[in-house]
Amino acid sequence: MITLDTLLLSAEYQPLVDTKSLRVCGYEALSRFKDKQGNATPPNIIFEQLHEQSHLLSLIEHKAKAFQIEHSDLTLPLFINLDPHAAEHNFDEMLVLLSSRADITVELIENTCINDARLSSKLLSQLKAKQISVALDDIGAPHSMLSLDLLSQVNTLKFDIDWFNKTSPSDLNLIKALIQFAKSSDKLCVLEGIETLAQLELARGLDIDLVQGFLFKEQFVTAPTSIALIA
């Protein structure tokens, strides 16, 4: 069990890059954690622990999103991922916070539980009512499920690179069909996890709009400061 009150919270901003011009068109904000000696703790470990304490998860996610918004580049769109469970106890406050930033897109994290999909659908409706753009994250990742309700209503589809590593013709046909659906529905397509020029060319060939990943690591931005995770 990690002692949370010894950790510091920061943020990393990963660029979303236009596949054709290679121009940075926005950033995704990601939470980062380290101890007072500067040693990093993987975010997945922190959030796995927080999921066992739902009220604490909501409080820390609100703090993390406020920090990410405060230190973001206001001249470019900002993408923020949000676990639906993180808004269960303080959604009104979270909605006010998200509404305070122009050009923001909330990425809903897909999970394997049907109840999570229902929670995501409810959250999507509330975000759309406030005219906040929504993306469906991790499409094609091994742990994800695909909700047709979410798929039809979101503004952006974010595909996981794992799907493109599959060799089955049916997998490729499916991803092509989803991209065609997105294009015909005026939805943005993003491919995550780009590490090589070959993957970038694959994205271009499939008419993906934006890409992000370690191929563009030199353009990653880290927040200039950090704050206590738990005051």
Image (tube, helix red, strand yellow):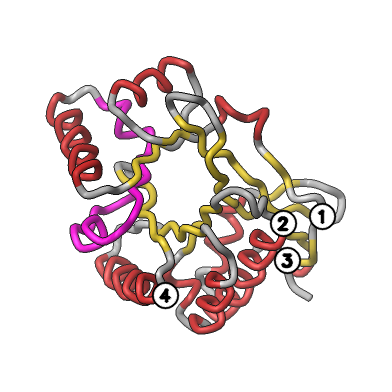
The residue at 20%/63% (across/down) is 149
Callout 2 amino acid: His
Q: Are marks 2 and 4 in contact (CB under 8 Å)?
A: no
Is tag 3's residue or tag 1's residue first in the polypeptide sequence?
A: 3
Task: Give the CA separation, mark 2 to mark 4.
Answer: 23 Å
Depth check, front residue: 65 or 230: 65
The residue at 34%/58% (across/down) is 111
The magenta segment is: 144-166
**Residue 159: percent from left, percent from top:** 35, 41
Count of numbered circles in the view? 4
Q: Are marks 4 and 1 in contact (CB under 8 Å)?
A: no
Crowding near pointer 1: few (<14 within 10 Å), some, many (20+)? few
Q: Against 97, is 83 above or below?
A: above
Q: Which residue is mark 1?
A: 225
User: Which residue is most to the right?
Assistant: 37
Q: Are marks 3 and 4 in contact (CB under 8 Å)?
A: no
Crowding near pointer 3: few (<14 within 10 Å), some, many (20+)? few
Is residue 53 in the magenta section? no
Is tag 4's residue or tag 1's residue first in the polypeptide sequence?
A: 4
Q: Residue 71 shows which numbered tag?
A: 2
